[in-house]
Amino acid sequence: MAKPVRGLRFQPSGGSRAAQIPVGKKQRLTIERLANDGRGIAFLEGRTWFVAGALAGEEVEARVLGAHGKVVEARTERVFSASDLRRPAPCAHAGRCGGCSVQHLPHDEQLALKQRMLAEQLSRVAGVEPEAWAAPLSGPEFGYRRRARVAVRWDAKAKKLEVGFRAAGSQDIVAIDECPVLVQPLQPIMSRLPAMLQRLSKPQALGHVELFSGSAIAVLLRHMAPLSAADLEILQAFCAFHGAQLWLHGEGEPQPVDPDQTLGYRLEPWNLQLAYRPGDFVQVNAGVNEAMVAQALEWLAPQADERVLDLFCGLGNFALPLAQNVREVVAVEGVATMVARAAENAASNNLHNTRFFQADLSQPLSDAEWAREGFSAVLLDPPRDGAFEVVRKLASLGAKRLVYVSCNPATLARDTVELVRQGYRLKRAGILDMFPQTAHVEAMALFEAS
């Protein structure tokens, strides 16, 4: 009888495992094409390289950020042969700050990249193309961002406070003295913020800072220990100099130092004022946001006698303009505090034909009281993971028209498969350029029942 063999070791097919490429290694590459996220794609020795900051047709030197099997992530260190499309990066922090990854592309080429990304997802995943493509909704490519989170971290070893934005491909913080995509009212605050924070007595207790420009300018400081009277005086003087509200976030919810101060933003075409508090979701691009709301209303074509459903309603960004055009709006949101804020926004704008409800929209729609009467039309604006469980039940609500606002073309395409299965046709689609200089794509799609 043969002796049993113990401890057998199996080699992967093809022989020994290839050595991993070390982080930091530099490699000369020829870029074949662009990936959907704007990175260049190169192929070398059986591996696929994704190279930030590279364009199709270029020959570049890339530094490895990480490697996983046959996939290597890298960033451009040097361009030997540049594409005709390449432009000088408008920001001095390009390549280090992780915020604006495609600023080396002209804006019209950025829009074309985003359009291709949306079309490819709809075609590849859902097997559909809209009956009509809408022109991109776009605004200024710089000076658009009205909200920003600034990273703050105490380096105990260097005994230095780091203030800025996260670096590309790491958790390092890049010191920022100017950010071209911020709205103008936030620029002087951003440039003077690091020096002010360095004057505080307990820098190790500081968290992030949030900046906001709307109906007022606000500076929120996250802190993990009580602030001294002297520190509070420094913060208040800084905000007074810049005409900004001071908000503090210690234990509990963020609060204004002056309890009588309010914060919000306007939807000017509809003469609406929406209250906002730091931590609430709000679109960072005011101009494109207004254009997006206007296009959603045009596509949905709400009628005066209709009952309309707004899912993932947030602060009422769509619900309140809709309420000016229809008999009733039912608005649903998963976060209870946002539901309360949206209801207050409706009341303060004298809109009494809106009803707001809290529900977990990651779960299938059940026999909720608000859904029983049905709806003529539905608008939904879900987070990045989409709204699959919600769209599975939309046909049962009787809606003939549906506008889907998406911040992730992949989940929009996935949900389109389900909507087509229920008998909806994709009538129109287009991109929303909410974040110029980045590869992030937002989109809007109109579906109609067959």
Image (spheres, helix red, strand yellow):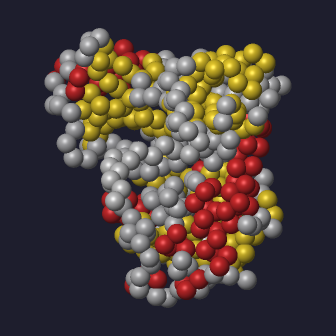
Residue 165 x/y as whole percent = 45, 27
The residue lying at 39 percent from left, 35 percent from top is 210
Residue 195 x/y as whole percent = 36, 14
Quarter holding the C terminus is bottom right
The residue lying at 64 percent from left, 71 percent from top is 417
Residue 22 x/y as whole percent = 50, 24
The residue lying at 20 percent from left, 21 percent from top is 202
**348 horizontally vs 71: left or right:** left
Quarter of the image for residue 333 reads bottom left
Which residue is at the front of the view, 18 or 141? 18
Residue 127 seen by the camera: yes
In this view, 399 is above or below 21: below
Which residue is at the front of the view, 406 or 178? 406
Seen as rendered, the residue at the extreme bottom is 373
**81 horizontally vs 268: left or right:** right
Quarter of the image for residue 321 reads bottom right
The residue lying at 42 percent from left, 23 percent from top is 173
**410 horizontally vs 20: left or right:** right
In this view, 331 is above or below 78: below
Seen as rendered, the residue at the extreme top is 158
Quarter of the image for residue 295 reads bottom right
